[in-house]
Image (cartoon, coloured by chain):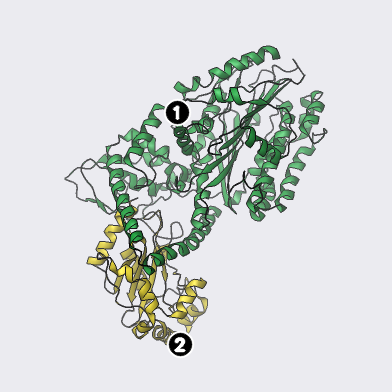
Chain colours: A yellow, B green
């Protein structure tokens, strides 16, 4: 019920004790439009990648889950080209497993886990999923390639526009500064397309 | 099942819709470095936080009774949405009962008699709009009917109600048509009250009761602990002349009666909504469901400063013989024996403007709570939402009286201003026309006093009519809709297509004709709004009663778990907590809201209800 106050608490928690490999911050002064970054876990094809996510907190949060989407393209059986994530905790019951005792931090952790452990039995991307199941080497190769192409830190200089638009986000002292951006132009386009 | 699907669609829909908006806002503020704007945003967030604090303060200080009262009337809203003062005001209002500044004078003064029935809907709408309040009524044999339309020029709210009383006892007294000024509007009475009221036998009495008029179905169904009946009886004499005067006196009396009888203020809106500001607020109480659609439209990003929602509801209360009560056949059974309760039919059409954000329907527990479990009333509710239309149809049966409530909520824009030119408006127009046709056919029904329940068996067939309406939202829907009603009418309707002609023809008809008719045109309306079974989804939340049955206590400092995991806020002394069977505790207002649409514990996901009980939920 306490969307604003709860979000505030969550954000300060995320700032002070972020889960490992995860950062989250506000965009502008909007309390309900957040950005997050997940670092690709070691021993995953996403290693060294920085994945940006968009979090839109609905009006009815926490009775409705936040809407989380990858902004950075990622090659993953459960994440589609628009960045949508197939994960039960992101959906309301009875289909999903969202519940108000979860929070943004736990969701991001779940996503991090999903990145490390795809669930090919509940695929969003059928091709990638079968590849993951039956030709894992190829999958790893592709995923790595995508990570380098879209999620590597070298992309940062190209991201002036993004950084600029989010500059004011980092003005907010209560919010953690972003460490880098890796959104490519192409990906931005795909975001619009979606 | 479909309900969820629909919800999901909506989910996605609003998500996609909202996205660009938010993006634009944020990039605007950041790109231009518009400090004022960010400052304003920050300020508004701070304000909201303050209001949220106040909200909790307020909720914590409420007695359980008051809390329930407010929750069930959807007065709590979302924390931070309204100020504490407003909450307080609402509480007082709901406790004091509805303001009875009923539109009596209004109506009396402004009502203009107008017997023409064949107006096209547009003419009608226009005329209604221009003339403000109109009353048409008629008396025919043992039936009297009355149509009241009222417009509030300031708000543009608009309401039309048609009420028909059929009194078999009064049967053949006077077959001439007679105009009669409107008596009381079928205002805001609780439908359920209506039902219970109609249980009262009144065999020898020619009195007619007014069943509740419009109420949003879900609300009606979820407010079980509602107030005592506010049924009104109006004695009718057999002579039409007398009746007229009688009716007049009654009219002035009626607004007063309900004061004591109806503590449930929120449903009184219908009569008072066009009045002053506070009563408009009242109206919000019962029209929340409607705003669901509106709200959604809003999030989709269309720029609408204000929208109109059309609400059409057709509550009907008719006597159903006990034996035939459950019969689901389409055939007309033996008509009621003389001396049975006279049925009253009320049609209610409401158009009101919805202020964006005035109310968040989805946040209201009572509306979300789906109460099909309330089998004592044999209430069945169908709900669907498609193509911007939200339909609810409920059928309940109690003591042989079957009540239908069909509510349709359509978000429309400028329906009254643009001459119904928009696509949506066309659909609405179609629907309204349908409704008006139904009104015309009503006189037909007046003669029937039939016991058949054609609406039972036809939900599926009806879908055909409603589907195109929903989907196309345009003129094409006309055909589907018309077909369905046409079919239904066919049986007994040998009169012309105008109601006037029909009325004439009908005089000669006895109830025998109606037995042949097979179904009642009036009910075809209900069928028209009746929804596909597929849409009838299992409610996933608990009912209010089920929630209230869960343990509740006040927080004491010694308790181990100190934080509500819904709001991540520590309990403070005096907080009311609810304890689920799994022993997990939450703030009452936090968990109630969750449970209104879910049935598992937020922490352990265990079902809150024992599986045996779940039957009743599903």
In this rendering, is residue A124 above or below B509? below
**Viewer-nearest residue: B422 or B12:** B422
Residue at the image point whose x is 76% and y is 32% from the top: B499
Mark in the foreground, 1 or 2: 1
Position of A105 with respect to B241 (left or right) is left
Q: Secondary structure at mark 1?
A: loop
Q: Position of residue B44 (x, y in %)?
A: 33, 53
User: Which chain contains the residue that carries disc 2?
Assistant: A
Q: Chain of mark 1?
A: B
In this image, A86 relative to A177: left or right? Answer: right
Q: Please provide percent x and percent y for residue A102.
A: 33, 59
- Pointer 1 with pointer 2, Cβ within 8 A: no
The residue under label 1 is B98
Can residue B142 be seen by looking at this rendering? Answer: yes
Disc 1/disc 2 C-alpha distance (Å): 70 Å
Q: Is residue B456 visible?
A: no
Indicate whether A104 appears above or below B162: below
Q: Is residue B564 above or below residue B87?
A: below
Bin the neighbour count of mark 1 within 10 Å (Cα to Cα): few under 14, some 14-19, many 20 and up: many
Question: How many numbered discs, if any?
Answer: 2
Image position of B184 (left or right of A10): right
Report the residue at 44% width, 69% height from top.
A85
Label 2: few (<14), some (14–19) or many (≥20) C-alpha neighbours in 10 Å? few
| Residue hosting label 2 | A138
Q: Position of residue A135 (x, y in %)?
A: 47, 85
């Amino acid at each position: 019920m306490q969307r604003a106050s709860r979000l505030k608490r969550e954000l300060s928690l995320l700032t002070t004790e972020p889960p490992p490999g995860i950062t989250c911050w506000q965009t502008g002064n909007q309390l309900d439009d957040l950005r997050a970054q997940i670092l690709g876990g070691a021993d995953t094809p996403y290693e060294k990648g920085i994945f940006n996510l968009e979090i839109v907190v609905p009006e009815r949060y926490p009775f409705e889950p936040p809407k989380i989407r990858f902004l950075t393209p990622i090659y993953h059986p459960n994440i589609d080209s628009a960045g949508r994530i197939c994960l039960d905790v992101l959906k309301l019951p009875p289909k999903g497993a969202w519940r108000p005792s979860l929070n943004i931090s736990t969701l991001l952790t779940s996503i991090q886990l999903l990145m490390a452990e795809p669930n090919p039995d509940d695929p969003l991307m059928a091709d990638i999923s079968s590849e993951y199941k039956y030709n894992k080497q190829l999958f790893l190769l592709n995923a790595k390639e995508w990570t380098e192409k879209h999620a590597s830190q070298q992309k940062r200089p190209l991201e002036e526009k993004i950084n600029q638009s989010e500059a004011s986000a980092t003005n907010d002292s209560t919010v953690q500064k972003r460490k880098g951006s890796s959104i490519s132009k192409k990906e931005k386009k795909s975001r619009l397309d979606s | 099942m479909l309900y969820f699907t629909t919800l999901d669609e909506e989910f996605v829909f609003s998500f996609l819709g909202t996205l660009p908006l938010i993006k634009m806002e944020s990039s605007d503020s950041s790109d231009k470095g518009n400090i004022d704007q960010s400052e304003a945003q920050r300020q508004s967030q701070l304000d909201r936080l303050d209001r949220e604090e106040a909200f909790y303060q307020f909720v914590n200080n409420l007695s359980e009774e008051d809390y329930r009262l407010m929750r069930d009337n959807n007065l709590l809203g979302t924390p931070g949405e309204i100020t504490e003062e407003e909450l307080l005001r609402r509480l007082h209002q709901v406790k004091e009962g509805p303001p009875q500044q009923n539109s009596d004078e209004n109506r009396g003064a402004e009502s203009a008699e107008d017997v023409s029935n064949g107006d096209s809907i547009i003419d009608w709408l226009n005329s209604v709009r221009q003339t403000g309040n109109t009353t048409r009524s008629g008396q025919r044999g043992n039936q009297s009917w009355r149509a009241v339309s009222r417009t509030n020029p300031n708000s543009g709210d608009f309401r039309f109600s048609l009420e028909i009383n059929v009194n078999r006892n009064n049967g053949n007294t006077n077959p001439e048509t007679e105009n009669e000024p409107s008596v009381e509007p079928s205002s805001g009475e609780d439908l359920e009250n209506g039902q219970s009221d109609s249980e009262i036998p009144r065999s020898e009495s020619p009195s007619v009761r007014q069943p509740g008029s419009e109420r949003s179905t879900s609300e009606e169904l979820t407010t079980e602990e509602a107030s005592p009946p506010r049924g009104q009886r109006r004695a009718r004499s057999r002579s039409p002349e007398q009746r007229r005067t009688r009716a007049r006196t009654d009219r002035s009396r009626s607004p007063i009666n309900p004061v004591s009888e109806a503590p449930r203020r929120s449903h009184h809106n219908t009569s008072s909504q066009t009045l002053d500001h506070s009563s408009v607020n009242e109206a919000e109480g019962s029209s929340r469901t409607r705003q669901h659609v509106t709200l959604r439209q809003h999030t989709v990003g269309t720029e609408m400063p204000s929208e109109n929602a059309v609400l059409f509801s057709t509550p009907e209360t008719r006597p159903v013989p006990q034996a035939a009560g459950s019969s689901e056949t389409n055939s007309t059974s033996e008509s009621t024996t003389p001396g049975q309760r006279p049925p009253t039919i009320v049609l209610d059409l409401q158009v009101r403007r919805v202020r964006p954000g005035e109310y968040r329907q989805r946040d209201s527990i009572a509306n979300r709570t789906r109460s099909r479990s309330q089998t004592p009333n044999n209430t069945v509710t169908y709900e669907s939402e498609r193509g911007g239309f939200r339909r609810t149809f409920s059928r309940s049966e109690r003591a042989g009286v079957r009540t239908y409530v069909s509510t349709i909520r359509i978000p429309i824009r400028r329906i009254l201003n643009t001459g119904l030119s928009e696509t949506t408006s066309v659909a609405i127009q179609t629907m309204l026309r349908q409704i008006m046709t139904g009104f015309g056919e009503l006189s037909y029904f007046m003669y029937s006093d039939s016991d058949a329940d054609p609406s039972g068996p036809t939900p599926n067939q009806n879908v055909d009519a409603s589907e195109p309406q929903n989907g196309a939202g345009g003129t094409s829907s006309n055909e589907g809709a018309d077909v369905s009603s046409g079919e239904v009418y066919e049986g007994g309707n040998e009169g012309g297509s105008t109601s006037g002609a029909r009325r004439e023809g009908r005089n000669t008809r006895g109830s025998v004709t109606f037995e042949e008719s097979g179904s009642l045109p009036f009910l075809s309306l209900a069928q028209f709004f009746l929804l596909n079974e597929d849409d009838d989804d299992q409610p996933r939340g608990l009912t209010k009663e089920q929630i209230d049955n869960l343990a509740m206590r006040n927080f004491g400092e010694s308790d181990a778990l100190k934080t509500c995991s819904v709001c991540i806020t520590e309990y403070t002394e005096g907080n009311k907590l609810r304890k689920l069977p799994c022993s997990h505790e939450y703030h009452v207002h936090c968990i109630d809201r969750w449970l209104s649409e879910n049935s598992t514990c937020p922490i352990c996901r265990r079902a809150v209800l024992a599986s045996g009980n779940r039957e009743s939920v599903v």
